[in-house]
Amino acid sequence: MYYEHFGLKYPPFKITPDTQLFYHGGNRGLVLNALVYAIENGEGIVKVVGEVGSGKTMLCRMLEEKLPKRIEVVYIVNPRLPPEMILHAIALEMRLPITPQDNRLQVMQALQTRLLEKHANNQQVVVFIEEAQEMPLETLEEIRLLSNLETTRHKLLQIVLFGQPELDNNLSATHIRQLKERITHSFYLKALTRPDIREYLRFRMHAVGYRGLPVFSPAAVRLLTRVSKGLMRRINILADKALLAAFADDAYLVRPKHICLAARDSGFACPRFFTSTWVSLLIVIVLVLGLWFSPYRETTWAWLKSYTETTFSANPETTSLAKPETTLPPISTTTTDPLLQQRLEATEQWLAKANGQHYSIQVMQTKVDKTENLVAFLRQPEIQPLLEDLYIYRVSRKGDVFWEMVYAQFADADSAVAAIATLPKILQRNKPFLRKIASFQ
């Protein structure tokens, strides 16, 4: 629904694992590489622990993709198997010729024979057990016995346990302490920090085709960090719904109010700001009262009056709320270059009648104090055929003033995306991206 609004090819924050959107930050890439190393080197039993929604399933899918073809992956999707069934489950996944009537000894013999065959052919088998905290302790003990299958130099079967923190509690039980001692590596997926989340949002948006300034404001990222508690599944749910809320608001920047709407819709608590507001008000009252009874009261009031009169009379615009992005009048009376002046006037005429819901392609941005670079750019031979469709305006961001250049007008996002591919290399270098005309009109 909001994909065209933000110029996306497909959803950036799907709940189902998509390995094309795997985020290597937040220590996830390091854990993935360490898991590959441990399995390839026959390290026996490995454990991965993370909270609900921390990305264990995505890591599991990525691990399967990263492992070489000579390593066969066996999934155990039902961890609640009784100990007498775990061998049968692994044997069936490996397509061994066994029947439900075969006893434990027969299944173990068939399993060992197949593992030895694979070892002779320089192949390995690794078992992935998801939600391992749900596995009965007796079944975990059976897992330990499976790790005894080995040659004189190599383990025949690798085992990776993926579980929540309760798995550590289960492994602390006295009667399975031998299993705990067999675990050669333990990895923990920690919650993402605010910088991680900011980068995660940027990575996901760009991975699905977004080209532009950050969509999530710093305040939105701060609130998202608090509400999600750094858990990837929550981040995906909230980010997806926040983008939808921004789309419904016809906005191109996700703000805290959109995060709160997403949180309430998802049943997550959105922090209230009343407490901090009342605390701030109380501090102001205390300061005013302290000043009122201060011996320096008259001097201080006189200074404040002088300061406010000077400041606000000289700068009346400071009394209004600052916007994150302010489009300035497109005509600059200071420019002396006739070509730039002609494009500025053409831009003013175009913006006056352009449909704000249509799209344009931003192809360049440079500071106003580097106007000579813009003029030189306009005179490039590759630019001349496009000149009549290039529009230039000024924009202020965080105190700096920039020239921005956009190309043409398109009725829909698909047409604009197709046009990007036809732009000359001199424009492609700037990584052009879509913008709705209303965002700078």
Image (cartoon, rainbow, N blue to C red):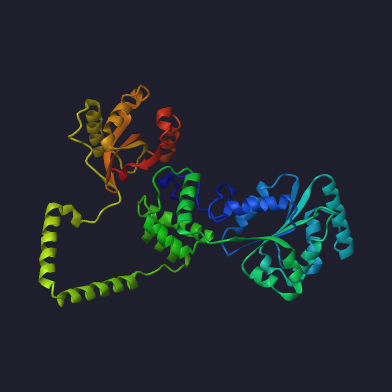
Q: Quadrant of the C terminus?
A: top left
Would residue 25 appear left or right of 409 to someone viewing this image?
Answer: right
Report if residue 407 is visible in the image: yes
**Residue drawn at x 39%, y 46% as measured from the top left:** 213
Q: Position of residue 201 (x, y in %)?
A: 47, 52
**Residue drawn at x 85%, y 54% as measured from the top left:** 152
**Residue drawn at x 17%, y 35% as measured from the top left:** 333
Above or below — where is 191 with respect to 341? Answer: below
Would residue 25 appear left or right of 130 to someone viewing this image?
Answer: left
Q: Front-most of 142 and 253?
A: 142
Q: Position of residue 367 (x, y in %)?
A: 29, 38
Above or below — where is 171 with respect to 47? Answer: below
Q: Residue furthest front?
A: 295
Residue 413's image quarter? Answer: top left
Report if residue 101 is visible in the image: no
Residue 336's image quarter? Answer: top left
Q: Front-most of 177 and 92?
A: 177
